[in-house]
Image: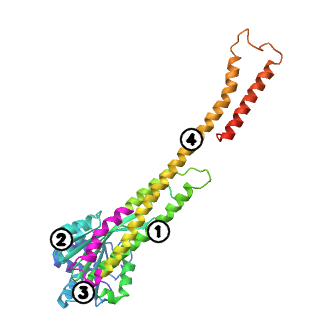
Amino acid sequence: MQMSMAGNLRKVTSLGGVGGLRKVARLARRRPRVDLSHPARSPLGSSVVNCVTYRDGVRTAARGDLVDAVESVRKKGEGFVWLGLHEPTDREFAGIAELFDLHPLAVEDAVEAHQRPKLEHYDETLFAVFKTVCYVEHEELTATSEVVNTGEIMVFVGKDFVITVRHGRHGSLGPLREELESDPHQLAKGPSAVLHAIADHVVDDYLTVTDSVHADIDQVETDVFAETGARVDPGRIYQLKRELLELKRAVAPLSRPLEDLATRPIRAVDPEIQAYFRDVSDHLLRAKEQIAAFDELLNSILQAHLAQVTVAQNEDMRKITAWAAIIAVPTMVCGVYGMNFDHMPELHWRYGYGMVIGVISVACLTLYRGFRRSGWL
């Protein structure tokens, strides 16, 4: 069972503070309960995707509203609340920020999005930003194809709460929540276990996307070196490089935050979880190395393509030059005999015309065979 405060969260600021949250929750309990784990946005019309309380790694039944759940967890000193949001507005997030005492700068970042991956500390609250990526399926790679789509997940981690704020149409955390719930021992380690699961999920998506991008690069490489004579659009290569840059912007800045989570003592992170972050950091390093290798490979493919274009242009120029030389012979002879002088050799000879045509033909044939032997034709 989950708490139904979705659909009324927009009234928080007008109702004011914690008391407003209680009124919102009372209104929400009148609505039928809806499973909000998987949709991108709540069907009730707010940014709330899910709100669940866990004790000893097990989901507990909802008894009351969000405020009651938080007060119960803090009174008993065990368990935590996991609140999931999708693209909340300032008004929707104001009451939650007040309830969990979130720092205004972190709240601003969570609402505005378009942040670099980072890790920040605000008193006892940890604020992490992850860039999510997904591979955009396409039948054929073109110069305008979208290959990589990015989003963001912001995570607030406290002693007894986790708040996830997701931006973008992909990266749903519903399946991740179900996977965590199937491992109560890991989930019992607290909010930092959720933070690790999200980081691991995001980095695994990086590896999945890099594998898919690799297939596109292989296809472009095959087309460039194919012996079909077809010209490859260089825009496809540039487009792949642009999309790879987008992927690099998501992956590269995450190295420092993961290193801090894996090595530095952080109050909000269980020491047992830090070993798991080292594993995630290793996976991230693999993704970074793949992206760097792909970038070098695309540079090589582009240089090879440009070299092929240059060679093809030289071939065309040699053919044009050879044919121009062949055509120059009859042009020169006909030009000489077209000057209309009275006294010209063989001008009035009966077989003069045939002789000139024969000379022209022999000269052109000789040039043609010479150019063929030299590879110009």
* Foreground disc of the pair 1, 2: 1
Instruction: Look at the picture and state if 356 lies above or below 368.
Output: above
Residue situated in front as seen by the camera: 363 or 202? 363
Q: Which residue is drawn at 81% across and 14% down?
A: 349
**Quadrant containing the N terminus in the rendered view:** bottom left
Specify the quadrant of the image occupied by residue 36: bottom left
Query: What is the distance, in whole Å, between disc 1 and disc 4 at their CAs?
Result: 37 Å
Q: Is residue 111 toward the left or the right of residue 210 in the image?
A: left
Circles 3, 4 touching at the beta carbon (< 8 Å): no
Q: Residue 119: within the magenta?
A: no
Query: What is the distance, in whole Å, between disc 1 and disc 3 at their CAs?
Result: 46 Å
What amino acid is labelled 1 in the image? Asp
What amino acid is labelled 2 in the image? His
Segment tinted magenta in the rendering: 247-274
Q: Which residue is drawn at 76% across and 22% down?
A: 356
Q: Is residue 230 toward the left or the right of residue 187 in the image?
A: right
Instruction: Check disc 3 and report the residue beneath it.
Output: 64
Circles 1, 3 touching at the beta carbon (< 8 Å): no
What amino acid is labelled 4 in the image? Asn
Instruction: Check disc 4 and report the residue beneath it.
Output: 314
Q: Is mark 4 on a helix, strand or loop?
A: helix
Q: Is residue 195 toward the left or the right of residue 338 in the image?
A: left
Instruction: Check disc 2 and report the residue beneath it.
Output: 103
| Nearer-N-terminus badge (2/3) | 3
